[in-house]
Image: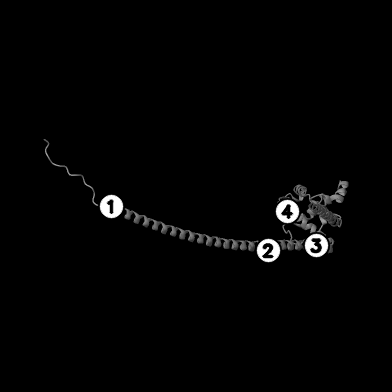
Amino acid sequence: MGRYFDTWMIRHGETNEDERAMARIIKGEEKIQRRKDITSALDWKVSQYKMPWQELRLPIGSAKGKSFTEDEDRFLTCMMHKLGYGRWEELKLEIRKAWQFRFDWYIKSRTPLELQRRCDIIVKSIEQEKDPAKRAALLEKKNNRSKALRAAKKAKAEAAKANADVDGEDEDDEDEEDEEDEDEESEEESDDDEEEEDDEEEESEEDEDDEDEDVEMTDTKGKGKRGATGKAKGRPAKKKGRKN
C-alpha cells in the first residue's frame, strides 16, 4: 500500500481527476490527524487520575448539554478512551450493559448521533483545557476558512447576478430589435395592401368603361337594323274566289 501511494504521489499529475483526488486525500489526512489529536487529548485527561472512572472531572459548563449528568459524561470519556473515538454503536451497547445506568432511561435511549454530539463537546472542552492557545488557533483557522467560503459564495452569487442582468439587457435589446422589425414589416404590408387596393380600383374602373362601350355598341346595332328593313314584311293576301 505504501509503495502504491508513493508511486501515485509521483505520477498523480498524469490522471484526469488530479485535483479531485488530491482534495480527497487531503481531507482524509486531516481526519486521521484529527483522530490522533483527540486520542492524545483523551490520554492526557485520563492519565491525570488514578481512578478516572470515579474521579475524572470535566470543565463543561451547565449550558452545554445540561441533560447529561457528570457521571454520564465521565463514563463517556473513559469509554471513548477505551474503545476509541468514532465507535458510537459500540459505545451505545456498552451504555446499555452498564449496571450504573440500568434505571437511567435517558442515556440508554440516546441515539449514536446524539452520543457523538455529546462526545464532541467533551473532547473540545478537554482540548481547550490541555492547550488553550492551540485550541484558539484552531478555532481562528476554522473561522477564517468559514469566512473565505462565505466570501467565495457571495462573489459567485454576485457574478451570477451580474451575468443574469447582462443577459436580461441583451434580451431587451433583442426584443426592441424584433419590435422594430415587426413595425417595418407591418408598414410594408400596409403599403402593399394600399397598392393592391389602388390596382383593384383601377381594374374595376376599366371594367365599367368596357361594359359601357359594349352597351353602346349593342344599341347602335339594333337601331341600324330597324332603319334598313322598315316595316316588317307580312304574308301576301289570299285571293277570295270560288272554284269552278
Figure label count? 4
Q: CA distance from mark 1 to mark 2?
A: 100 Å
Of marks 2 and 4, the one in the foreground: 2
Q: Residues within 10 Å of mark 4 (few under 14, many from 20)?
A: few
Q: CA distance from mark 4 to mark 1?
A: 132 Å
Image location (x, y in percent) of residue 38: 82, 55
Q: Amino acid at mark 3?
A: Lys
Q: Which residue is mark 3?
A: 141
Q: Earlier in the sequence, mark 3 or mark 1?
A: 3
Of marks 3 and 1, the one in the foreground: 1
Pointers 2 and 3 in contact (C-beta within 8 Å): no
The secondary structure type at the circle numbered 4 is: helix
Q: Which residue is mark 2?
A: 162
Q: Furthest residue to the front? A: 244
Q: Which mark is residue 114?
A: 4
Q: Amino acid at mark 1?
A: Ala
Q: Amino acid at mark 4?
A: Glu
